[in-house]
Image (cartoon, rainbow, N blue to C red):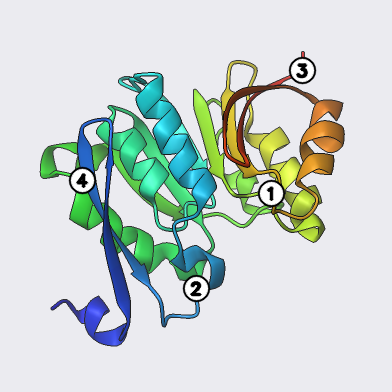
Amino acid sequence: MSTTEDKIKNVEVKDYDYCGHTMKISLFKESSLGVSAYVWGPGLALCQFFQEENVDFTGKRLLELGSGSGIVGILATLLGGDVTLTDKPYVMKQLEYNVSANIPPDAKHRIKISPLLWGTDQKNYPNDFDFILGSDLVYCPVQFPCLFQTLRDLCGPNTVIYLSTDMKYREGSVDFHETLLPEQFNSEVVNTSRSNCIYKVTKKH
């Protein structure tokens, strides 16, 4: 058992199968990670969307916001992308563990993990990513201004953002997607699964 597992008394492990890949995702349940210690429906919906669309990210540069367990960013890497996973600093150990467990040695150069606090740290990142991914980011209205600012700063003229949101059970989600986001972004629903909606978002020119 690893040192990390020794420190985390309750590690929940589950396999997820998408796009021909099996990912073994570990969640550190007793590490004060809060919502980050779960795999949420919108993340699984985005993985399913990649599978249904037969997505190939080969040669593409991607940034994931609020990576949490890392399942979406890990899958994007397995699908050929060069991916940067981001979240709050205290989530880094869980992300590092799952990346280590799921990314083969010959692909580790295509994935990195970095802390990013919305509203401030995005200025330390480039704005020329091909794709920005976000699942279950829209659930706390007090965070919306920082999230919006982060998306605006990171989104270049050719960047495509995929946001997957539980529209029924997340407070303020309808207002964010139908009122706030359209102020400066083009946005369209490209997939629905139960109460989860996946939006394809680009910056208005």
Q: Which residue is mark 4?
A: 103
Residue 41 higher or lower than 110, as above or below:
below
Q: Residue furthest top?
A: 205
State the image quarter where residue 57 is shown: top left
Distance Cα–Cα, label 3 vs label 2: 35 Å
Distance Cα–Cα, label 1 vs label 3: 20 Å
Distance Cα–Cα, label 1 vs label 2: 18 Å
Side (left or right) of 11 relative to 102: right
Q: Amino acid at mark 1?
A: Val
> Residue 1's x, y, as percent?
13, 78
Distance Cα–Cα, label 1 vs label 4: 28 Å
Distance Cα–Cα, label 4 vs label 3: 35 Å
Q: Which residue is mark 1?
A: 138
SS for dot 3: loop
Residue nearest the viewer, comparing 32 with 152: 32
Name the N-terminal-most of marks 4 and 2. 2
Q: Residue at x 48, y 71 (%)?
A: 90
> Residue 127's x, y, as percent?
59, 30
Visible residue check, residue 125: no
Q: Quadrant of the C terminus?
A: top right
State the image quarter where residue 58 is shown: top left
Q: Amino acid at mark 3?
A: Lys
State the image quarter where residue 188 is shown: top right
Residue nearest the viewer, comparing 195 with 63: 195
> Residue 89's x, y, as percent?
50, 66
Side (left or right) of 180 relative to 103: right
Residue 88 higher or lower than 110, as above or below:
below
Visible residue check, residue 177: yes
Q: Amino acid at mark 2?
A: Leu
Q: Residue 33 bears which disc, if any? A: 2
Q: Which residue is mark 3?
A: 204
